[in-house]
Amino acid sequence: MNYSILLTCLASISLSACASSSVTQLSSNTAVISASAAPICRTTGAASVANQMAAIATIKAGYNRFIVGGFGTMNNTRVVSTGPTYATTSGSFNRFGNSVYGTTNTTYGGSSTFLAGSNEAEMQITMLNPGDVGYEQGIDARAALGPDWQKKVDGGVNNCF
């Protein structure tokens, strides 16, 4: 079986919900956004989810723009390899007079390698409305989400793309 096709299919299936996030409200206009994404998303995917969730939190709180006050990412991914689960040995021999000549071959199988862990991103935001200090420098929440911003506000963000 072609393993690259299998891995591509599995990655496509797993990316349909490869990220999660939470919003911790610190005050009426400040919040901390925490995002976690699958290993295949990398830290840039987790950062993208955090940014989109910051925009969603801003709109849901009744604000138009936000400023990022602090930001950080962390890669907690690792490659895990399991040992072989079986070994098969076969051999052959030939006898010529008083001498025996032979060969053996041992095949190991059943091992696998997979990615585990997650990528994390966290940001603190200050949400702003017109007239607030820093409003002009803030990120427009609707523009950050794109043309289908309402759909994202209603459904949330659960993938890193």
Image (cartoon, rainbow, N blue to C red):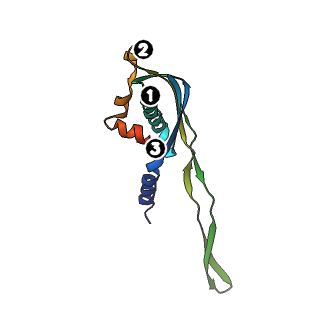
* Circle 2 residue: 132
- In the rendered structure, which disc, 3 or 2, sits on the residue that comes first in sequence? 2
SS at mark 2 in the image: loop
Question: Residue 108 appears at what percent x and percent y?
Answer: 60, 66
State whether residue 12 is above or below residue 77: below
- Disc 2, disc 1: CB below 8 Å? no
Amino acid type, mark 2: Asp
- Work out whether residue 35 can be spotted: no
Which amino acid is tagged 3? Answer: Asn
Where, quadrant-wise, is the N terminus in this rendering? bottom left
Check disc 1 and report the residue beneath it.
58
Image quarter of residue 62 = top left
Q: Please tell me in which quadrant of the rendered image residue 157 appears.
A: top left
Give the left or right position of residue 136, taking residue 68 as reference.
Answer: left
**Residue position for label 3:** 158
**Is residue 135 shown left or right of residue 110?**
left
Q: Secondary structure at mark 3?
A: loop
Q: Residue at x 42, y 53 (%)?
A: 12
Residue 64: tell me if it is visible.
yes
Nearer the observer, 144 or 79: 144
Mark earlier in primary sequence (1, 3): 1
Q: Which mark is residue 101?
A: none
Q: Residues within 10 Å of mark 3 (few under 14, many from 20)?
A: some
Outermost residue toward the bottom?
Answer: 97
Q: Nearer the viewer, residue 158 or 7?
A: 158
What residue is at 42 percent from the left and 24 percent from the top? 63
Mark 3–mark 2 distance (CA, rounded to whole Å):
31 Å
> Which three-letter amino acid code belongs to the residue tagged 1?
Thr
Q: Nearer the viewer, residue 9 or 27?
A: 27
